Image: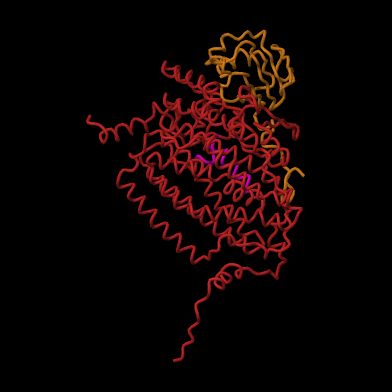
Chain colours: A red, B orange
Amino acid sequence: MDMQVKKKLGLKDRYALMTRDLGWDTTYQPMEKVFPYDRYEGIKIHDWDKWEDPFRLTMDAYWKYQGEKEKKLYAVMEAFAQNNGHLGVTDARYLNAIKLFIQGVSPLEYYAHRGFAHAGRHFSGVGARVACQMQSIDELRHFQTQVHTISNYNKHYNGMHSFRHMFDRVWYLSVPKSFFEDALSAGPFEFLTSVSFSFEYVLTNLLFVPFMSGAAYNGDMATVTFGFSAQSDESRHMTLGLECIKFMLEQDPDNVPIVQAWMDKWFWRGYRLLTLVGMMMDYMLPKRVMSWAEAWEIYVEQNGGALFKDLARYGIRPPKGLAQATADKHHITHQAWGTFYNYAAAAPFHTWIPEKDEMEWLSAKYPDTFDKHYRPRLEHWREQDAAGNRFYNKTLPMLCNTCQIPMLFTEPGDPTKICYRESDYLGDKFHFCSDGCKEIFDHEPAKYAQSWLPVHQIYQGNCFPEGTDPTKEGFEPLPAVLDYYGMNFGRDNLDFNVSEDKRNFEQWRGPSSSNT
Amino acid sequence: MAVTAIKDYAFPARDRVENFHGAQLLFIGWEDHLLFAAPHAFPFPPAMPFRAVVEQVLPGVYGYHPDFAQIDWRRVEWLKSGQPFAPDLDKSLADNGLKHKDVIRFRTPGLTGIAGSCS
């Protein structure tokens, strides 16, 4: 029999067939009805063929690469579990960084999966669709590997048991949740500007480097490994972010002011969200990597500066809030840690006062601000705690209507005064922590008038377990709210020094490091 | 346009006063005392006398601070939305002109927090 063996497809043909060739123009329905979402934001696209594929990857190759990475990762996780890796960390305070991660970051990976699936359906350009679909699968994988890795800690320590339930309810988690829901409920171009560009390109190093180096410094090899496994994906994601920005800017000059406004907005929203990471770096890692201020200098002032120089030729300037954020780098982490210290009864991780040598570290890293503004506060709390009078703030805080963080930030140039800003809309006042958050509201007030502010929701009676009667005599709201959050009072919350985590870690680890 | 949306998007605010079961929100901050991380939010009936806020609510909120016992309430300076404000202690919140989601602050001259650090 005569067999005609076809030559193997070249890389280029194969790539064309398995990406761009998968799309077609619809005929039963007009294209604009099939793809309504990529028009209403005002972005004008004249030629989708000019889109350059950032990934250069076909699905079959994608499965192969990811499968190899998974095998390595799960082997490390297995070894970690078998060797009691949960006892290898520097000390049990470190676990609170992991709690912050599983409660506040991993659910964002899942949101990113959903967001890219949506964008991967709604761009009318096939190149953009394929890239978004691949990233959507990446994000789902990241979520899964993080949950699997951290589940090993969940077997031994508190506060990680109901992270998904908590994400939709706990007051501080409304900060990451509302950030991502703001992006998800925007159109696909704004979504890519917010997540792919502002977050993944401009700010991502401030999220992943601190967590992954923090893990390495503190003996948490499992977290380091999922970090590495995600890293090659992240570099593809950054490429997508930059490509999308350049594509929009090159397609039509009318796109420039829209993109600039999104960059201003999402820089500020991302920066506000990263307050949590900065606090983790300066206060939660027993063995510190670098300070928030140092990370800001390297990753934003230096690297970001180069990026925006490059974008200047399109008529793009650096984000509006950059100077403010840079000036605030000496303050926000201390202010945030003080806030969680205040509300330690209501958050599902522990807080504490830094040890003496840690105070020295903070003083050296923040020579102009720490001793003057923040040390007296911490030392007062420590004295009170030693006298059996640990401070727990029991009154709910006022929140910023945009970033949903308690109004803890101070006036530009005056760290002794809380910064208050407000706008009037629909006959009511709306309050903000900063000019950046006020401007975001003023641009789209109808959107943020729907903010689900945890404090206001509690006062509206929406945060108690079903069947609770808040009008009953002797009703205590705090236990009911914590019950609704899925928190175990006395185990998941309060000061680290009275925690079960601390006690258990000492009991388990003790025999391996001492003779008694 | 109040929002970039694919179709009409107009809804009453989520935090309108009707949703608070007869209460209205009042935000209160104590200037120069950042040991309390942020101003506080309270649901108060509009008919509540301002005196009740000062004498019955604030001690429970701020009494932890060593400065609180030293406050001379006759010298306290009040601000509403950043502007000077002269509340009448015996009038209700509503009669003092306080509406839903108003923000007031009080400054206590001479008291500057832990070791003068505004904490």
* Along the viewing direction, whichever of A468 and A89 lies nearer the viewer: A89
Q: Return the x and y of residue A307 as percentages of the image width and height.
A: 62, 48
Q: Is residue A466 visible?
A: no
Q: Is A315 included in the stretch rendered in magenta?
A: no
B2 relative position to A390: left or right: right
Magenta stretch, main secondary structure class:
helix
Quadrant location, the N terminus of chain A: bottom left
The residue that appears at 65% across and 69% down in the rendered structure is: A24
* Along the viewing direction, whichever of A88 and A350 lies nearer the viewer: A88
Res. A320 image quadrant: top right
**Magenta range:** A166-184
A164 relative position to A33: left or right: left
A84 relative position to A212: left or right: left
Q: Return the x and y of residue A309 as percentages of the image width and height.
A: 66, 47
The residue that appears at 56% across and 18% down in the rendered structure is: B117
The correct choice, above or below, for A34 with respect to A515 in the image is: below
The correct choice, above or below, for A325 with respect to A201 in the image is: above
Quadrant location, the C terminus of chain A: top left
The residue that appears at 53% across and 23% down in the rendered structure is: A374
Q: Return the x and y of residue A73 as percentages of the image width and height.
A: 39, 53
Q: Is residue B105 visible?
A: yes
